[in-house]
Image (cartoon, grey):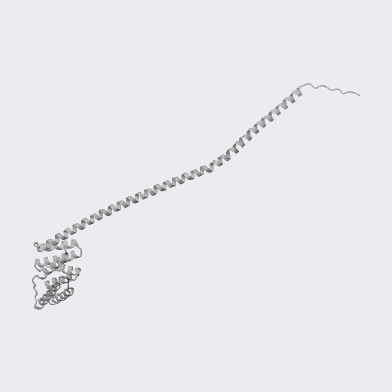
Amino acid sequence: MKIKGLFVAILLLAIALPQMAGAQTERKYIRQGNRQFNSAFADSTKVDSTRFAAAEASYRKALEQDPNSWDASFNLANAMASQGRMEEAARQYQALGAKTDVDKTKRAAAYHNLGNCLLQSENLQGAIDAYKNALRNNPNDLETKYNLAWAQDKMKQQQNENQQNQNQNKQDQDQQNQKQNQDQQQDQQQNQDQQQKDKQDQQNQDNQQQQPQQAQQQPEQNDEQMSREDAMRILEALENDEKDVQEKVQKQKAQPQRRRTQKDW
């Protein structure tokens, strides 16, 4: 559905609503504005924004004559919307739809065009609400029913797309978290392996340093042990020699001594 084309068609239909001007001058400006508005579509290849602006000026002159003119206010909103000023037009339609002193057909037209403005601004929920308000005032309006169904279908598509995007984002996030966890575990394992390797290397280095020291200490211990054994043997030999000497002395003492006489010369 081409929203702009539909919107223009609805605007033309809305312009054709019966005019109920309270004064001759007001009706004159409204008729003048309607002619300018319709002439903007005379060339189907382009839209004459200059004539929309002229129509807007005429509707404003009508409102100067009668500020409460619903028709002049409604057509002014149409002229603003046709110039792309959707926010201004939407405020005008909203105010006109809320009026309770006009017939429901006019209120339905205001809400219908409000929905078109919001649809143009991609405010789908606002457009849906506006179309529903239009149908509450004019339940048999086929154009409003069609626009409501289109907006609801469009919103459903967006919701599905958003849900798919959320699911995809969640899946991507889960994969990213999983990868981060794997990377962290891998880093931790590498750190542990490196620490174990460093510890083993240090232990091997310590063992290599201790082996020469043990090799150097062993001869010293053997030399010390041999020196003690030699000392014991020497001591025992000395003790044995001394014992033999003492035994010889005792034997000599025990033998009788010969008396020597002194010879006289």
Q: Quadrant of the C terminus?
A: top right
Q: Picture quarter containing residue 102? A: bottom left
Observer able to see residue 171: yes
Observer able to see residue 98: no
Q: Position of residue 87 (x, y in %)?
A: 20, 68
Residue situated furthest bottom in the rendering: 25
Q: Position of residue 132 (x, y in %)?
A: 13, 61
* Residue 213, above or below 25: above
Q: Quadrant of the N terminus?
A: bottom left
Q: Give the residue displayed 14% in from the left and 61% down from the top.
A: 148
Judged left or right of residue 154, residue 220 is: right
Judged left or right of residue 137, residue 259 is: right
How many numbered circles are shown? 0
Judged left or right of residue 170, residue 253 is: right
Q: Picture quarter containing residue 96? A: bottom left
Q: Nearer the viewer, residue 101 or 79?
A: 79
Residue situated furthest right in the rendering: 265
Q: Give the residue displayed 31% in from the left and 51% down from the top.
A: 175
* Residue 154, above or below 45: above
Q: Nearer the viewer, residue 3 or 167?
A: 3
Q: Position of residue 41 (x, y in %)?
A: 14, 71
Q: Give the residue displayed 46% in from the left and 45% down from the top.
A: 199
Q: Picture quarter containing residue 45? A: bottom left
Judged left or right of residue 4, residue 183 is: right
Q: Position of residue 227 (x, y in %)?
A: 63, 35
Q: Give the residue displayed 12% in from the left and 66% down from the top.
A: 109
